[in-house]
Image: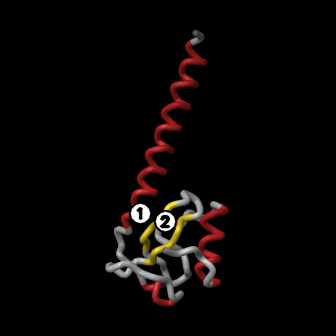
Amino acid sequence: MDDRLERVIRRKLREAGKQFEEAKRAYAEGRDDPDGDATGAERYDLPTDEDGRARIVCRRHAERRAVAVDAGGRPSCFDAGHPDCEGCAEDVRDGYVETW
């Protein structure tokens, strides 16, 4: 195998691995809610768990989550620019988000 091709493949694999780890960490942080800020759950009249986090169904990952919602109607797992996350935040603000 050509050395240049091998270097390119290795570099791309490392980049993909880093992106995967960043996404995995962001996903875990969104699920765990390290900030514990649940002010938006009350403002948007969302059902909450015993810790005051909103109980919503994530559009992006199709799973139940208990997450903090900020005053702007964005769940803590919100990823700006992702269409599912953008739609979820709009639904929270409009009162049409799926809950459990």
The part of the image, by quadrant, that contains residue 80 is bottom right
Horizontally, is 28 left or right of 12 in the view?
A: left
Q: How many marks?
A: 2
- Tell me the residue at 38%/68% (across/down): 33
Residue at the extreme front of the image, as rendered: 100
Residue 12 position (above or below residue 65): above
The type of residue carrying mark 2 is Cys
Spot occupied by residue 60 in the image (x, y as percentages of width and height):
58, 59
The type of residue carrying mark 1 is Arg
Residue at the extreme top of the image, as rendered: 1
Residue 25 position (above or below residue 43): above
Which disc is residue 77 wearing? 2
- Tell me the residue at 46%/89% (across/down): 42
The part of the image, by quadrant, that contains residue 66 is bottom left
Horizontally, is 66 left or right of 84 in the view?
A: left
Spot occupied by residue 64 in the image (x, y as percentages of width and height):
47, 65
Question: SS for tag 1?
Answer: helix
- Tell me the residue at 48%/79% (across/down): 70
Question: SS for tag 2?
Answer: loop
Which disc is residue 43 wearing? none
- Tell me the residue at 43%/72% (across/down): 67
| Front-lying residue, 7 or 100 | 100
Residue 92 position (above or below residue 27): below
Residue at the extreme left of the image, as rendered: 50
Image quadrant in which the N terminus is located? top right
The residue that disc 1 covers is 31
Label 1 with label 2: CB-CB less than 8 Å:
yes
Spot occupied by residue 10 in the image (x, y as percentages of width and height):
51, 25
Q: Classify 10 Å Cα crowding around label 1: few (below 14), some (14-19), many (20 and above).
A: some
Q: In the rendered structure, which disc, 1 or 2, sits on the residue that comes first in sequence?
A: 1
